[in-house]
């Protein structure tokens, strides 16, 4: 519900202009709570339901700081005289000082970046505020990054930018992180945590997210202010419907919703299901559309204007479906096709959109009704609680609906109860309550920097970006979210929230001393080392059951609460079978205590001592001021986001496979396709199989994209995404092959990269 009528006497003129552009007459609850903090210097963690207007606060902070940087006068009272545009025009001929107070917007997806870039360019146009989007090597332009006022990028790309342009942080005032809850996601979380750890003392941070379980932890970690609201602009009703005939229920909802000029989002478990259901229900949807609200000519004009190729897989079906008032949306579609569908939905020309969960995390497309067909993914894993509520939160259109509605299908009453218990806090007294009256349940956001490989990559990235001394590096690691939540290492088998609620206040055990053990070798295993490890990994509740030795391996059986874990020492590697196999655990510490001191020291040094390993293998070096910096090899690792093990695999592939064969451009392309698909152990999408020939025709033979994808019946989005993976791989292989002195291969990589860059630019 909108609250807090604006008092114009307290609002700068420039803000009023933005409000006028956006049609804002009243602040929402989260905007009213956040507004006073626009003028502070504190980090902000803003948490509220989707569509509540969180981003406006970040935009006003950016505008305020650019304006202040442009104004030189010491007696200036901001917002009360000339407009920003007028003051800027007075300074023509000088460097725009606003570029020294940049705001960086970090978003997880290209779709969100494009939407953000369009929005900011529109609202800031008259103030001559420049926005630049840097998403890959193709659009990397250090001059534009330096001279823009607002930079939009992804977490991964910004890590590369601050590594290449460390001085940039001196001109950055604010960093805004959208969807910051992704710090608790396995694949992307460590990258975002590393970026925030590197910059948190240098800039003001504004973190935005829909509701999570522990936002106060993020705020405390950043020493910031938590501002939260659970108020939705449109109230939301839920219903879980047990049914063995979901199609009949979908038809019922369509016939009860579409005639009243409302729209529906149907979230499906797979791509195939989105297409099948869209095609199946197209006649029903079209039959229930009010002809006066459906402009077929406008739809056809939009398709014609955007030149959406009919030849690609899916597009021909889209052409047919949109003329019936429906469509589907998934990651296989090209970005152009997705944007056309999103635009038609926003203009209410698509009445029912069948989509996958990727839309829930993408652009803002609210509808009156949301249907969740299945709360489990294709691999039978439950949707995370945060993703579930983010999808459900799409229901209810501000300014159009008085209430939103989310319908969840279940197979029977048992699954109905399981869904209720998983996604809502249900106690004995709440059993009879309707879902909209129950408090939702969210996932805890924890650090995923929990393996030695991730720690190693974080260390390399921090050295690459900050050039710290060893002492400063320990302090940087101490600022990580990993360190903030370090109590999770005390008992890795106990849930974080259970531990958090089990004692008065939150007693944390900082890992700073442990980081010293991780970074540098020890000459002697002292009592102090013993105390550090015992404090972090107490062993009073576990027992060493027995040890046994085999060929080249020593193993120990440890018992904890009746469960057995195997700790092994193989070729100097120290591992444990516990389910939370962090880079260290209490089971390994118990075994270590039983070993001779000299042997224990050797194991610690061979398994930890990250800096020694990096120095010996020439990934880092130390200058005369004792500052660490990455070598060429280390910089390549940091920019590719790989650790030593993966780097060695790539190096061996170049030296022992490619170098002897002297591959042609075509052979090199085929090799890159294989490596790009396997990089970082990513799951290979079913549509990435058998793509060698179509990619060869597109890149080497230069055939047009529509011709290639039509010939091989491919999804354009999958095809371009794999080419982008190859491009990203080449960006690392070019300096790596040059460093290794593989001149001919390096020249071919450069040639292939130039061809691919041109092809991708044409395609996008």
Image: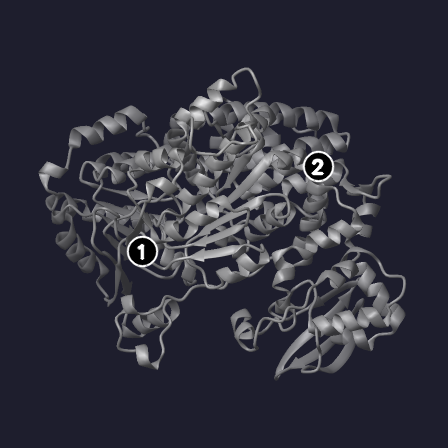
Residue found at the far front of this picture: 75
| Cα separation between marks 1 and 2 | 54 Å
Quadrant location, the N terminus: bottom left
Q: Position of residue 58 (x, y in %)?
A: 45, 43
**Mark nearer the N terminus (1 vs 2):** 1
Q: Residue at x 79, y 61 (%)?
A: 517
The answer to which image quadrant residue 13 occupies is top left
Q: State whether residue 261 is above or below residue 227.
A: above
Q: How is the image coloured?
A: one colour
Q: Quadrant of the C terminus?
A: top left
Residue 525 is at least partly visible in this image: yes
Residue at x 54% of width, y 61% of height: 217
Q: Which residue is mark 2?
A: 654
Name the one closer to the observer, 758 or 689. 758
On screen, residue 553 above or below 405: below
The correct choice, above or below, for 599 with respect to 227 in the image is below
Snapshot quadrant of residue 174? top right
Does residue 178 show up? no
View extreme (top): residue: 93
Residue 393 pos. (x, y %): 33, 55
Q: Specify the quadrant of the image occupied by residue 141.
A: top right
- Which is in the foreground here, disc 1 or disc 2? 1
Where disc 1 sits, the SS reads: loop
Q: How many marks do you count on the picture?
A: 2
Near mark 1 (Cα within 10 A), the count class, few <14, some 14-19 or many ≥20, is: many
Q: Nearer the viewer, residue 493 or 155?
A: 155
Judging by the rendered image, the residue that carries numbered circle 1 is 232
Residue 292 on image: x %, y %: 10, 37
Say which mark, if any, is on residue 477: none
Residue at image coords 74%, 70%: 568
């Amino acid at each position: 519900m909108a609250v807090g009528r604006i008092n114009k006497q307290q609002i700068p003129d420039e803000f009023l202009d933005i409000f006028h552009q956006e049609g804002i007459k009243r602040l929402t609850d989260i905007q009213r709570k956040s507004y006073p903090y626009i003028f502070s210097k504190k980090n902000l963690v803003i948490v509220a339901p989707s569509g509540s207007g969180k981003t406006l606060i970040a935009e006003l902070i950016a505008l305020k700081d650019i304006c202040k940087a442009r104004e030189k006068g010491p007696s200036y009272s901001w917002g009360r005289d000339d407009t920003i545009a007028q003051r800027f025009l007075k300074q023509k001929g000088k460097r725009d000082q606003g570029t020294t107070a940049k705001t960086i917007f970090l978003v997880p997806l290209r779709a969100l970046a494009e939407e953000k870039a369009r929005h900011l360019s529109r609202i800031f146009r008259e103030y001559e505020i420049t926005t630049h989007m840097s998403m890959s090597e193709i659009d990397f332009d250090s001059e534009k990054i330096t001279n823009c006022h607002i930079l939009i990028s992804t977490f991964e790309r910004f890590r590369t930018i601050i590594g290449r342009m460390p001085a940039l942080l001196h001109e950055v005032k604010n960093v805004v992180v959208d969807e910051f809850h992704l710090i608790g996601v396995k694949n992307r979380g460590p990258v975002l945590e590393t970026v925030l750890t590197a910059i948190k003392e240098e800039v003001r941070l504004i973190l935005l997210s829909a509701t999570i379980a522990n936002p106060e932890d993020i705020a405390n970690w950043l020493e910031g202010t938590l501002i939260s609201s659970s108020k939705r602009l449109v109230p939301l009703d839920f219903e879980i419907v047990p049914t063995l005939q979901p199609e009949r229920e979908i038809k019922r909802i369509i016939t009860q919703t579409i005639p009243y000029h409302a729209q529906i989002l149907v979230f499906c478990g797979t791509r195939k299901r989105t297409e099948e259901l869209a095609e199946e229900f197209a006649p029903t949807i079209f039959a229930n559309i009010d002809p006066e609200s459906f402009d077929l000519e406008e739809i056809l004009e939009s398709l014609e204007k955007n030149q959406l190729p009919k030849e690609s897989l899916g597009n021909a079906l889209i052409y047919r479906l949109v003329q019936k008032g429906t469509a589907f949306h998934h990651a296989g579609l090209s970005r152009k096709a997705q944007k056309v569908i999103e635009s038609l939905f926003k203009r209410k020309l698509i009445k029912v959109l069948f989509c996958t969960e990727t839309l829930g995390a993408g652009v803002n497309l609210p509808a009156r009704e949301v249907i969740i067909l299945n709360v489990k993914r294709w691999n039978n894993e439950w949707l995370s609680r945060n993703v579930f509520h983010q999808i459900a939160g799409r229901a209810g259109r501000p300014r159009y609906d008085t209430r939103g509605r989310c319908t969840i299908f279940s197979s029977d009453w048992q699954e109905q109860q399981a869904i209720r218990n998983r996604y809502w806090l249900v106690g004995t007294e709440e059993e009879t309550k309707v879902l909209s009256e129950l408090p939702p349940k969210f996932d805890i956001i924890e650090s995923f920097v929990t393996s030695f490989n991730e720690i190693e990559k974080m260390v390399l990235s921090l050295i690459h970006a900050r050039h710290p001394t060893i002492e400063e590096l320990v302090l940087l690691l101490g600022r990580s979210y990993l360190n903030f939540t370090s109590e999770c290492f005390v008992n890795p088998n106990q849930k974080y929230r259970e531990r958090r609620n089990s004692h008065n206040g939150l007693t944390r055990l900082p890992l700073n001393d442990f980081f010293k053990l991780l970074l540098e070798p020890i000459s002697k295993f002292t009592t102090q080392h013993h105390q550090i490890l015992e404090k972090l990994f107490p062993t009073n509740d576990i027992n060493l059951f027995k040890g046994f030795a085999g060929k080249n391996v020593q193993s120990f059986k440890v018992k904890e609460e009746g469960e057995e874990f195997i700790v092994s020492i193989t070729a100097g590697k120290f591992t444990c079978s516990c389910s939370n196999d962090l880079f260290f655990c209490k089971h390994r510490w118990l075994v270590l205590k039983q070993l001779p001191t000299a042997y224990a020291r050797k194991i610690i040094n061979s398994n930890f001592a990250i800096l020694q390993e990096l120095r010996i293998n020439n990934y880092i070096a130390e200058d005369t001021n004792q500052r660490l910096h990455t070598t060429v090899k280390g910089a390549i690792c940091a920019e590719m986001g790989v650790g030593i093990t993966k780097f060695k695999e790539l190096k061996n592939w170049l030296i022992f496979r490619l170098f002897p064969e002297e591959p042609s451009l075509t052979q090199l392309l085929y090799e890159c396709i294989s490596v790009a698909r396997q990089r970082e152990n990513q799951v290979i999408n079913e549509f990435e199989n058998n793509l060698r020939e179509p990619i060869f025709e597109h890149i080497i033979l230069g055939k047009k994209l529509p011709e290639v994808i039509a010939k091989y019946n491919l999804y354009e989005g999958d095809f371009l995404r794999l080419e982008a993976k190859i491009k990203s791989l080449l960006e690392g292989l070019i300096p790596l092959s040059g460093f290794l002195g593989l001149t001919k291969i390096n020249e071919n990589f450069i040639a292939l990269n130039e061809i691919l860059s041109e092809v991708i630019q044409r395609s996008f």
